[in-house]
Image: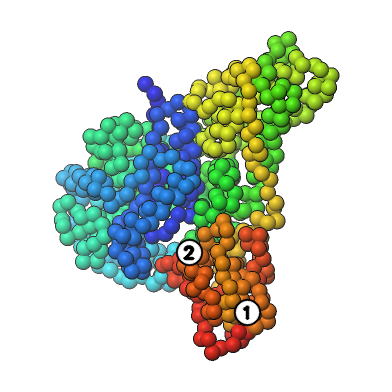
Amino acid sequence: MKERFYVTTPIYYVNAEPHIGHAYTTILADFMSRFYGMLGYDSYFLTGTDEHGDKINQAARTHGTTPQEYADRISGIFRQTWTDLGIRFNDFIRTTEKRHVAVVQALLQRVYDKGDIYFGSYGGFYCVGCERFFTEKEMVDGACPDHGTKLDYIEEKNYFFKMSRYQDWLIGHIEKHPDFIRPERYRNEVTALLKSESLEDLCISRPKSRLQWGITLPFDENYVTYVWFDALINYISALGYPDGEKFTKYWPVVEHIIAKDIVKPHGIFWPTMLKSAGIEPYRHLNVHGYWNMQNAKMSKSLGNVVTPADLVARYGNDQIRYFFLREMNFGHDAKFSEEIIVDRINFDLANDWGNLVNRLCNMVFKYFGGAIPPFDPAEPADRDDLTVRFRKAAQDYIGHAKNFQTSIGLEKLWEYIRYLNKYIDSNRPWQLAKEKNTARLSSIIRNLLEAVYGIAVLLSPALVGSSEAVLRALGTDTKPRDMETITAFTNLDDGQKITDPGILFPRLERGVAENDDPAAKKEEKTMASPEGVVDISEFAKIDIRVAKILTAARIDGSDKLLELKVDSGLDERTIIAGIAAWYAPEALVGKKILLVANLKPATIFKRTSNGMLMAATHAASDRPILIEIDDSIPAGSKLG
Ligand code: MSP
């Protein structure tokens, strides 16, 4: 029987569209699923969307729509984004689906019947953004420590889950299974929480008088389920718990992936819920760090969100997958910067791996008419050394990747790739060709081809499209094979014609991408002095003027940007504005708007943007609304 692997991502809230943080987790899960598939496992991958609760309800209201319509739309965008990114999930669960609702209700009933749910009273300061109550001690100046919004005191009757009953069990379970939560720092975080305080029981309901958008409690129709108690159950409802075949097959081998923001619900609520319901705890909770934009957390309210689709359109799918998997050291935070993306593409992908493949294929064409040369045992050309090194590199890669340490794993493989490039340089095949030393030349080229084959197979979960292109060029495929076979140097056929895979990873110019960095630009927009205030003299430096839009056009290859010509009263200039999703170009012509006229020019999509249009964006929406000025005010009028 095949071994099994089951990987999950958090189900994402549908109050915002996918950003790179979501994309990273999903790409990592996709990598893990493909990786185990490559090793011959029966691999299952679940993702989805979290659609109930106050947050979604409010977002829908802000957008003037019903929660269901709103959830349908945003969930659709998540699904489509993953499809566009080539994510191969086996199931996409939505918490508004009947199959999920039924399992949540069955599980609640079970926990209730067991006596682990009771009716009580609760008072506290509630934050809609966090979906939780805060104590006075936790608040900062009467406001939410995360969102800064003033919190109201709410007192209500609710249902509680006796989480405290399972505190000692959970401490013991973690002690017995030290890698239950990994890496260690997050296990320590949970253990510290568990040991430092007695767990409070978890409030698992919301009265319908306050919120209707949720799953009705099976034992009291006046209440809906707290969104976390509902959401966590997705990991088993999607498998058809309790009787589904998939539940029996995959639950015992589940690997949850989350980021550090949701360790508590996954590390404490979820295992105690499972224990109460009589379900085996999950196998591992794998926790990664945060992608930070220039040391600030990426979030919608900070306005520094970069969309995954933009990145992939600009750099390519494999390139972005590689960047994510290589650049984040699992468990730690990582810095998101397009400069680093460009460097990784140029150095690792183009110079090391792409170059190895290209120079090798060129030599096969040049010296062997495009046919794979045989290995000549009389001239092994360090074949044994190469295979030993390869086996070690592959073992390291596999070992680390199995533990979600993709960055270290890829680096191990890259050490070998770089070694192969040196092997070419030191063996000087061009010299051997000149000397007509065909035996040694054939062996060298064949050794390299076998190594490239093996590397392409190992890399196929990460570099999905380009690995397939390499294997196709070598006349072979990515069928699952065991490690022994992959590294055996006996996988290709003598005389097989290869084809030209072309340039796998075109080199990029660093400067273009640097100026083009939307993350950096958005960061600039949100920059303020540490105290958050500016001096009048600082404000006076900003030249804001009324300008008239003369022409507006879409930019090929971008669905976000418009190219505008404006009359600033000082000159006629070009502005690149990220408003294409909300404004039709023709509707803009003739409008008078506000322009930041002395902004440092920026290169965006190879065009120079001279200034910025001013728009207002409400915190609950990402829609910028241009500030329009009455036509009677002449272009060039200064604001201030
Ligand atoms: N709906 C809950 C999860 C319920 S799971 C039963 C939720 N949703 S979320 O949309 O806020 O997604 C949070 C997850 O998105 C993180 O745990 C992580 O996987 C990913 N990330 C969001 N921002 C991120 C970064 N800046 N960096 C890395 N990952 C990030 O919480």
- Measured as percent of width and height from the top left, residue 188 is found at 45, 45
Vertical relation: 282 (above or below) 476? below
**Amino acid at pointer 2:** Ala
The numbered mark at residue 31 is: none
Disc 2, ligand 1: is the CB inside 8 Å?
A: no
Q: Which quadrant is home to the C terminus? A: bottom right
The picture places residue 81, in percent across and down from the top left corner, at 45, 50
The image quadrant of residue 431 is top right
Q: Amino acid at mark 1?
A: Asp
Which quadrant of the structure image shows residue 476?
top right
Answer with mark 1 or mark 2, whichever residue precedes in sequence.
Answer: 1
Q: Examine the rendering and report whether any part of residue 244 can be seen.
A: yes
Seen as rendered, the residue at the extreme right is 435
Give neighbour class at mark 1: few <14, some 14-19, many 20+ (Cα, 10 Å).
many
Horizontally, residue 218 falls left or right of residue 485, namely: left
- Dot 1 beta carbon under 8 Å from ligand 1: no
Direction top: furthest residue: 378
* Residue at which label 1 appears: 567
Quadrant where the image shows the N terminus: top left
Res 534 quadrant in image: bottom right
Q: Which residue is mark 2?
A: 581
Q: In this rendering, is residue 91 above or below 621?
A: above
Give percent across and percent down for residue 353: 66, 35
Q: Residue at x 17, y 51 (%)?
A: 218
Q: Indicate left or right for 479 with 383 as reference.
A: left
Image side of residue 215 versus residue 625, left or right: left
Residue 615 is at least partly visible in this image: no
**Disc 1 from disc 2: Cα separation:** 23 Å
Residue at the (50%, 22%) spot, across then down: 482
Of 113 and 102, nearer the camera is 102
